Amino acid sequence: MKQTEEGKEKPVADSKPWYRGSWEIADSTDRAILKVYGCQNMKFFQPRRHLLLHNVWIKEDHIAFTILCNVEEYKGEIKTVEGINRRRRSDEARKRMTLAEIKNRGCKAAARVHISEIGDVHHYKKRDGSNTFVKKLKVKDQKNSKETFELVTFDGIANTQFEVHKRYLFECIIYNPEKGNFKTIGQNLPQVSA
């Protein structure tokens, strides 16, 4: 990691042709940590960025789990895998590419979610006097397209994460250009009770 002028860590390019993921059990409850390294353009996949997962189910071909993670940087940019706009983008627009679009572009990494839009932003004062913003995301249930629920993220708090208000199945896969297929990460994670 390199230090910027402001003293903040700046991600360094990954030497691997595809992005790595590893799993750890966070505690004795039904939580797990997914650590993903190497994606330079997506804050979601910066080195040392942890995704906290909840209610993990391990299957032969994929992993399903409820979201409990920090994707606040996307500000509602995550869309469904379907319906991707393939037009050429400016550099600024390219920075806002969704995970689904990245997947279709050679795709290194992808996450299948149905976060449709960002909701109201509420302002709070923390006990130490600093500001905290609570942002709500409306998420469409994959099993029932008419049903939505909200995720809440607290901006400005260390290890920011979404608070999940309803169980939501979510798949996380990475693309390996060398093998030409998608590989599910975390297959060796011990079964975590739902």
Image (spheres, helix red, strand yellow):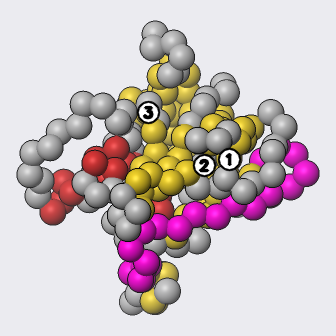
Ranked by sequence position, the earlier of labels 1 and 2 is 1
- Give the Cα distance between marks 3 and 2: 13 Å
Q: Secondary structure at mark 3?
A: strand
- Percent position (x, y) of residue 28? 91, 51
The part of the chain drawn in magenta is: 11-31
Q: Residue at x 17, y 39 (%)?
A: 85
Q: Residue furthest right?
A: 28
Residue closest to the eye, 116 or 21: 21
Q: Quadrant of residue 167?
A: top right
Residue 167 shown left or right of residue 120 in the figure: right
Check the image and report above or below for 144 versus 111: above
- Give the Cα distance between marks 1 and 3: 16 Å
To which residue does mark 2 refer?
A: 69
- Percent position (x, y) of residue 166? 66, 25
Which tag is nearer the camera, tag 1 or tag 2? Answer: 1
Q: Amino acid at mark 2?
A: Cys
Q: Quadrant of residue 152?
A: top right
Ranked by sequence position, the earlier of labels 3 and 2 is 2
Whether residue 95 is visible, yes or no, is: yes
Q: How many marks?
A: 3
Q: Are marks 1 and 2 in contact (CB under 8 Å)?
A: yes
Crowding around mark 3 (Cα neighbors within 10 Å: few <14, some 14 to 19, many 20+) is many
- Give the Cα distance between marks 1 and 2: 7 Å
Q: Secondary structure at mark 2?
A: loop
Q: Amino acid at mark 1?
A: Leu
Q: Residue at x 80, y 57 (%)?
A: 25
To which residue does mark 1 refer?
A: 53
Q: Amino acid at mark 3?
A: Ile
To which residue does mark 3 refer?
A: 115
